[in-house]
Image: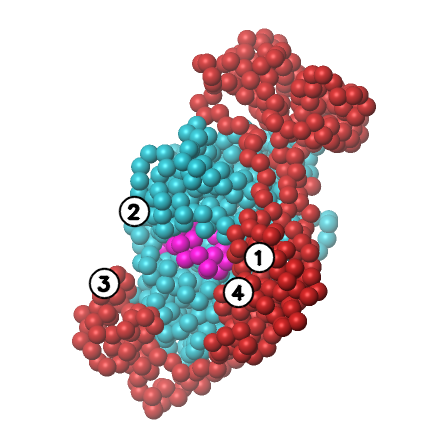
Chain colours: A cyan, B red
Amino acid sequence: VKKGEEKGFVALVLHAHLPYVRHPEYQMFLEEDWFFEAVTETYIPLLDMLEGLGKDGVEYRLTMSISPTLASMMLDPLLQERYLAHLDRLIDLTGREIERTRGQPEFHELAWMYHHRLQHSRYLFEERCGRNLVSAFGALQDSGRLEIMTCAATHGFLPLMDEHPWAVRGQIMTARDHYTECFGRPPRGIWLPECAYFPGLDAYLQEAEIRYFMLDTHGLLYGEPRPRYGVYAPVFTPSGVAAFGRDTESSKQVWSSEEGYPGDYDYREFYRDVGFDLDFEYVRPYVNPDGIRKFTGVKYYRITGKTRDKQPYRRQAALEKAAVHAGNFMFNRERQVEHLHGLTGRKPILVAPYDAELFGHWWFEGPEWLNYLFRKTAYDQRTFAFTTPSEYLRDNPTQQIQRPAASSWGNKGYYEVWLEGSNSWIYPHLHMAELRMRDLAQRYAGGDGIFDRAARQAARELLLAQASDWAFIMKTGTAVNYAVKRIKDHILRFTRIYEQAIAGSVDDAWLGETEGRDNIFKNINPAYWR
Amino acid sequence: MPGNDLKISARDLIRKTRKELLELAERLGISIENGTARTGIISALAAALREKAGTGARIVSTGRARARGAAARASTRLKDAAKSAQPDASPVSGGVIRVLDAVIQKTAEVAEKLVLGPRPPEKAPVEQEALEAAACAKAAEREPLGSETPPAPPEGAEQVVHGTGQAEAVKFSIAEKPEPQAFQQVEDLGEIPPGYGSGRFFITGRDPYWLFLYWDLAQEHIAAMKGASSDGRMWLQIHDVTGVIFDGFNARRTHEFAIPDGARNWYAHVTAPGRDFIARLGSKTDQGFVPSVVSRRVRMPPDDFSPRMDASFVTIPQDVPFSRLREVFRGGIDVSPGLAYSAAELQARGARLPFEYEGGGFAGAFAGPHGEEYRRSLAGSEEILERLRREALMNATSGSSWSGPQCGGYEPNRGE
């Protein structure tokens, strides 16, 4: 579709985030797998797919947040090294799987598929990207088709910091600085952690020169005054930062566990994995050394149906289904855009945000679905065009002014997921640390020597403790021990630094070790917490 | 290097790959026969390390009772682990079982010594053994970390959670070449305090229906409030102050709660979307409520459309930084309500600005407020909003808007 001839726009948004998990004190650490799995199953396939589109000259637009914690893990040499070791183990496993499945053609073919995919991932990661995925995504952004947003520094839940402006500022300014270091330009957009908004948050974004963010549907819908175009146009918040609202319809089609595409019976079943299915002694070298079975990513079955009797995965059929689903998604967006255009006489924008890990990690065929969707949209229809929020705003800088409503995209739409019986105990500690951090910043930021180091490390510990992931994990009930320990460790390290600094005597050796442990945000600026 | 000890815990050994173990053995001058199973290497290394450690072995500070508990727990867990091991296991797992057996026996012995025997004159070695066994057991027992889940605090009256036994591992110190960056697996960080006595009183509208409050007060402060109350209790008042400047007496509505001893926070079910609240803690006397701590004012999130249906539009050029826009709009206009409002006002006046604009009130964005296009857009707007409201309500009532298994972010069922 020629620019200007379209009847509306669609902005796909992927939110890529993981909490900072890095444990140099252990040789292997189970929770580091979150990152390794996401790299193999989501980030490398997305990168590969987008590079393919670029090579073929396909006009696409995609918006993606890469949280500062995720970017930091991508850039960390220790994790890069460990990721390669992780890949090598899996390549070894799939090699053995090729042998083991010789008599079972339907699995044998899949074993080869995994083997090739992993070797390709290794090549992409090590040779093509020089281990640096951040630069690889940055290069795609420089090509003008991918737009990368930032996120709060450690995905802190901002509405529960609203009493302490410096805490909000620390999260946002640190993110902005880190983004600029990573991508060589300041961020234009931000993914608010959990889409969580409180009235007034926009002012901090203006201070950081951030031009837009996303909200869940009701954030705009219940804002003041009513949004004239629902969520099909952004609004300008009082500070002038634009807010886009989520389109429920397009989100649901992909995301819903029941009606959504990812539950199709031809797609790969997530929960059947050789790490759990095969003889323990056989998989022992590929699971945790202390004997915990875990996902390897080698999965041979399709969803099949609501049955425990799963049938072998058929790759070709799954890809064909992904193409059908891409066509269906495109068709529905065409109808939706036409309808909205007819209603208002304006070109609507549909904003469809998803967790990036849905694509590839949870929904194995997700990256292929995106691939088909971008290609079909470019060639097979003339109703809508993909866009990014900043491209849309450049072309449409006149919008309604509104104060959006407090909201999040969590269950029930507000703050409950992160503030309820399982996790509310963390907030007195976080808030106390926020107050103490301001004290440290006022005394020591901008100085030099060990007190400045102490203030910087204290800011790191506070940020790491603030990650919304810990409260989320406590609520959902998986890996709770780990989340509790992480909050406590960071609060305790913070408190020790605070107490030593205030007492005028900082333990240099211990501080050095802590800097090595929690090594995120090398150039952090504690002055933001003043 | 003097002063730089190589510290390896038993668990650390178990986590190492075969290759890493062989390298370590070489560094320690231990000969390992070709083809020795990984567990065999671990046993050999553990023995050698223990020997080398000798009197120099350092124990993470911990109490005798904790060591005893850890040893007893470890023993039980290990027995369970051994029970669940397959009988027809391969040589490798046979090795593991033998190691486990040894550990079980040792743990049991140590536990017995601690439980039955009088306090031995030299407690350190015994504790060390117990801890070491516990550490091995923990590693064998597949725990990612040495902290335990705190009990879920009850709603309404919840306590700050205390963690348990984080220091149940042992380090072996050997005067050897250190690894480039050796971190201790167990840091002696202590425990987070139950509170700080900071005097803070926090309030927030968690959703349109529930207020959440917590207080971090010194014990004496709470005792004083209780003491001043005629019923000996601390009281919480929650005031609906929508549209009023609160003077202590003019709230539109007040909810009152007697706070049970030990409670540190409160969820108040007020069901008041969009309304404003202030809370106070204090005493109830014959003369009435005497406040001691007053919260900030908060507004509950809305759960429906705003009654305001006016719309003003503004042009905000995207290539001009906010820092520059702030300067532009500061010219003769109050920017306090927000840059967008100031800009809209200037644009409505037709002010000369260093960029093109079409904003400024409703007319700017459309053909005109009385034209066909305007009427059409307004009707369309109503239809859109109604439909979105239905969807939003469905999502809110189904309670499952975006929490399907596809979007959790963390795998459920991780290896249990």
Q: Residues within 10 Å of mark 3 (few under 14, many from 20)?
A: few
Chain of the residue that carries numbered disc 2 in the rendered image = A
As shown in the figure, which amino acid type bears the numbered disc 1?
Trp
The residue to which callout 4 is attached is B294
- In the image, residue A67 sits, relative to residue A448, either above or below, namely below
Residue B158 lies in magenta, yes or no? Answer: no
Give the distance between the C-alpha atoms of the residues marked 3 and 1, in whole angstroms: 43 Å
As shown in the figure, which amino acid type bears the numbered disc 2?
Gly
Q: Which mark is residue B215?
A: 1
Give the SS element for disc 4: strand
Give the SS element for disc 2: loop
- In the image, residue A21 sits, relative to residue B360, either above or below, namely above
Q: Which one is in front, A447 or A520?
A: A447
Give the distance between the C-alpha atoms of the residues marked 4 and 2, in whole angstroms: 47 Å
Query: Which residue lies at the image location 48% right of the left edge and 52% below the top edge?
Result: A156
The residue to which callout 3 is attached is B324
Measured as percent of width and height from the top left, residue B356 is found at 21, 73
Give the SS element for disc 3: helix
Nearest to the eye among marks 3 and 1: give it. 1
Which residue extends farthest right? B116
- Asked whether the beta carbons under mark 1 and mark 2 sit within 8 Å of each other, the answer is no
Query: Which residue lies at the image location 64% right of the left edge and 43% below the top edge?
Result: B162
On the picture, is A185 further left or further right than A304? left
